[in-house]
Image: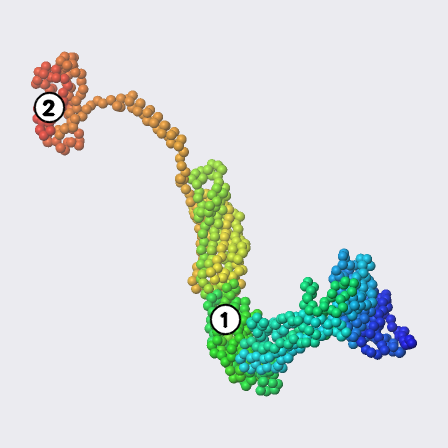
């Protein structure tokens, strides 16, 4: 007999055009035994402006006997725009044999199609369905509009689990989806409830867990089921505070194994868990989890110890089981940490911490690599322990970095120090016992890439002691203390320079300008001369000590204007500096003569280099000023008395209240560079050989002509012969010899005057004055000398010649 149903005439959809009521399924979703069922209504074209046609389903409880429809839970919306969620729905029966009916809802146009399996439970439909995508179905070709039609559930393979068929009309396909057997795997765990960690000793506790497999009723059981379990100790901490001995004998915080289970026979394991030493967190609970799952059968199917009693019909392959997702397969147990504090509440201790900076340096040298050591003491001046006690040390982290720590005196193990964004943090006791103290020395160091630069005046170092439970009421002021340390600058700057001259015909740099010989004459004769010369003055600034010098400004007076010739001697002036990068300097052509080294003959331009980067310890800064000149103008400048082109450089501070001198103990902050102008007289060029040949031939021709002229003049004919003797020199006049004394001139006088060379006059004996001139007659007969020819009368050496032995002098 049919039972009357009272319909609610007001049951309508939420949106016009949503096609509310397009599909309807009736099922006993909540599993109650009363004469009532649930009805599921779809509206596949439901959507919003941003997500059109996503689809929606509604669940109502249908009360037989006049109860009408009441909403059961919230509506369920589709996930994709245009997916048409709810276009097809189907009653599947109890697909997992848990006592609740299940349904299938499709969204055929979500991607290539998706079918959702919703399981019933006492509240209606579970919110987390199983999602079957078209891509997961292994069929030839592609599946499009998968889920356009869905059949009701029916046990095709006779394994007592309903199966169903899904159609995809655009792919001309229909697919049978078989239901896998469902098994239940549960876990249990037993351990202590709490543990006290007041003592800084290694503590342990016991823990046991079990894993059990249960089969569904009225289903053939699997005699041996492989199950993989995993135990995680202290799951909520990234670094576990607990450990146990693993199956390999090594300490571990995770145990993983695979076992074969028979139905309803638990597999249990007992172990000892140790608490690691020097853990920081002694307040949060130890959360331990045991979980179980089935192995992945996708690539490697398992070997069942006993096959099912009834194999699948029609030659269908055997399906391997899955876990019932509705029943948890994991268990979690917490172990509370008990503090046993004297005052209530017992799990919260309130200490009284006092911080003191006991030793610190009065000053530090900016840029020094020497460690800055700060000695600190923390006391717990109360009757309750201080858990997770920390000291937060603050310092200027842009200039300083934490290096290490050392312990001076302690009543509790120091857990360590590390850097953090404000400075450093040290865990100094967990717990720090009541009425105890700890003293440590923290070492800091200046950063190499950004040390202190000396204009800070001083830096502040502070410490603040904290505990997890706070400090005793009204006594937190003494948890904090700070000290100031003076920053002392110590730098040593040097400023040097050199001249670099290059020419078009000689690219190799030299310190002076060389003017070749004859260039001035070529210039006056308006002949072409070599053209361009580049004159560069390069200055080097070095910081040879510890302190970084901030933002240096360099001023250079560079010569360029020839005063006497009234021309720009050096043109196209450029200037740049190079430190971390190369940047230009400003140039002011103000013709400054007062600051120019050679201001009486040349005037200077002012070059200003604002170096924004700090000059760090052992840093090097290069400044180059250069310009072009011509040899013609340099020659005119040199001929007017200019033999030097000098520049002068000086350093100044910029952007700070201190001057450069405040940063310098030993420094040269002024320098001068001169470019000499050298006028050369001769060159080292080799003389060509034909010059030599022509010169020799010409000289020989001239000598020949001179000899011929002298010979023609009788220069080489000898008129007298001279005989040197003690008494003087008798000159014989050559005459004709007639052999027998005959001849016209036989009686002619042939003797000349006796001539005494001046060099011999002093050696001769004193002579009497010669007699007066008179006619001289030869006492000898004429024949006696006519035939003798021309003869000499020479005094013999060592004898005086008588006066009468010589002929009288001849006028």
Between 537 and 277, the residue placed more toward the observer is: 277
Residue 423 x %, y %: 54, 71
Which quadrant of the rendered structure holds the N terminus? Answer: bottom right
Q: Residue furthest bottom?
A: 343
Mark 1 Cα-neighbour bin, 10 Å: few <14, some 14–19, many ≥20: some
Above or below: residue 455 compared with residue 601:
below
Residue plotted at (82% across, 59% down) = 169
Residue 701 x %, y %: 35, 26
Between 99 and 387, the residue placed more toward the observer is: 99
Q: Quadrant of residue 279?
A: bottom right
Q: Is residue 398 left or right of residue 724?
A: right
- Judging by the rendered image, the residue that carries numbered circle 1 is 404
Of labels 2 and 1, earlier in sequence is 1
Above or below: residue 742 compared with residue 687:
above
Q: Is residue 598 visible?
A: no
Q: Is residue 222 left or right of residue 42?
A: left
Residue plotted at (14% across, 33% down) = 762
Q: Is residue 760 visible?
A: yes
- Judging by the rendered image, the residue that carries numbered circle 2 is 806
Q: Secondary structure at mark 2?
A: loop
Q: Is residue 594 left or right of residue 173?
A: left
């Amino acid at each position: 007999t049919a039972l009357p149903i009272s319909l609610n005439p007001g049951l309508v959809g939420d949106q016009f055009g949503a096609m509310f009521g397009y599909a309807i399924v009736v099922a006993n979703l909540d599993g109650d035994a009363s004469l009532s069922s649930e009805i599921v209504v779809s509206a596949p074209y439901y959507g919003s402006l941003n997500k059109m046609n996503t689809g929606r389903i509604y669940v109502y409880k249908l009360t037989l006997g006049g109860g009408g429809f009441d909403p059961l839970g919230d509506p369920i919306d589709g996930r994709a725009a245009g997916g048409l969620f709810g276009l097809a729905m189907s009653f599947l029966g109890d697909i997992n044999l848990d006592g609740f009916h299940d349904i299938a809802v499709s969204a055929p146009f979500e991607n290539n199609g998706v079918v959702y399996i919703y399981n019933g439970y006492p509240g209606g439909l579970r919110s987390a369905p199983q999602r079957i995508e078209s891509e997961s179905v292994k069929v030839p070709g592609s599946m499009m509009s998968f889920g356009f039609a869905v059949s009701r559930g029916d046990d095709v393979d006779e394994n007592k689990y309903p199966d169903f068929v899904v159609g995809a009309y655009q792919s001309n396909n229909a697919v049978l989806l078989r239901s896998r057997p469902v098994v239940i795997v549960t876990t249990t765990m037993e351990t202590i409830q709490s543990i006290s960690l007041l003592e800084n000793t290694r503590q342990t506790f016991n823990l046991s867990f079990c894993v059990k497999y249960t089969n569904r009723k009225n289903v053939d059981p699997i005699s041996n089921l492989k199950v993989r379990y995993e135990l995680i100790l202290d799951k909520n901490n990234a670094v576990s505070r607990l450990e146990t001995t693993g199956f390999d004998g090594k300490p571990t915080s995770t145990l993983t194994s695979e076992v074969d289970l028979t139905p309803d026979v638990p597999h249990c394991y007992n172990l000892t868990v140790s608490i690691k030493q020097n853990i920081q967190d002694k307040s949060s609970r130890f959360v331990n989890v045991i979980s179980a799952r089935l192995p992945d059968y996708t690539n490697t199917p398992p070997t069942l110890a006993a096959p099912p009693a009834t194999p699948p019909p029609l030659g269908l392959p055997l399906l391997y089981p899955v876990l019932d997702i509705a029943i948890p397969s994991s268990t979690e147990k917490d172990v509370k940490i008990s503090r046993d504090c004297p005052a209530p509440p017992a799990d919260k201790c309130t200490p009284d911490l006092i911080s003191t900076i006991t030793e610190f340096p009065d000053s530090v040298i900016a840029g020094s690599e020497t460690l800055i050591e700060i000695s600190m003491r923390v006391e717990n001046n109360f009757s309750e322990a201080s858990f997770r006690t920390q000291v937060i040390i603050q310092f200027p982290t842009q200039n300083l970095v934490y290096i290490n720590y050392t312990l001076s005196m302690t009543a509790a193990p120091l857990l360590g120090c590390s850097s953090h964004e404000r400075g450093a943090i040290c865990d100094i006791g967990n717990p720090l016992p009541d009425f105890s103290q700890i003293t440590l020395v923290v070492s800091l160091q200046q950063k190499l890439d950004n040390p202190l630069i000396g204009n800070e005046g001083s830096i502040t170092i502070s410490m603040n002691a904290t505990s997890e439970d706070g400090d005793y009421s009204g006594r937190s002021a003494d948890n904090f203390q700070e000290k100031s340390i003076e920053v002392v600058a110590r730098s040593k700057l040097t400023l040097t320079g050199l001249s670099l001259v290059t020419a078009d015909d000689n690219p190799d740099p030299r310190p002076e300008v060389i003017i070749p010989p004859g260039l001035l004459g070529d210039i006056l004769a308006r002949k072409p001369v070599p053209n361009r010369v580049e004159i560069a003055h390069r200055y080097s600034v070095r910081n040879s000590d510890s302190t970084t010098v901030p933002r240096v400004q360099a001023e250079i007076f560079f010569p360029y204007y020839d005063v006497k010739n009234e021309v720009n001697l050096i043109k196209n002036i450029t200037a740049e500096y190079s430190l971390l990068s190369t940047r230009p300097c400003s140039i002011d052509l103000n013709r400054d003569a007062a600051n120019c080294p050679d201001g009486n003959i040349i005037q200077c331009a002012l070059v200003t280099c604002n170096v924004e980067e700090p000059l760090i310890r052992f840093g090097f800064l290069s400044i180059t000023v250069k310009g072009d000149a011509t040899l013609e103008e340099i020659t005119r400048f040199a001929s007017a008395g200019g033999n030097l082109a000098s520049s002068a450089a000086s350093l100044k501070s910029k952007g700070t209240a201190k001057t450069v001198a405040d940063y310098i103990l030993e420094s040269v902050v002024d320098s001068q560079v001169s470019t000499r102008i050298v006028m050369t007289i001769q060159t080292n060029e080799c003389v060509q050989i034909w010059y030599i040949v022509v010169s020799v031939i010409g000289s020989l021709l001239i000598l020949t002509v001179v000899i011929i002229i002298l010979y023609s003049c009788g220069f080489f004919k000898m008129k007298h012969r001279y005989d040197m003797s003690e008494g003087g020199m008798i000159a014989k006049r050559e005459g004709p010899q007639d052999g027998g004394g005959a001849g016209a001139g036989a009686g002619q006088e042939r003797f000349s005057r006796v001539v005494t060379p001046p060099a011999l006059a002093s050696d001769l004996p004193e002579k009497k004055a010669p007699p007066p001139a008179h006619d001289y007659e030869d006492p000898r007969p004429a024949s006696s000398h006519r035939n003798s020819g021309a003869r000499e009368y020479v005094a013999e050496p060592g004898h005086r010649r008588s006066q009468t032995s010589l002929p009288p002098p001849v006028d």
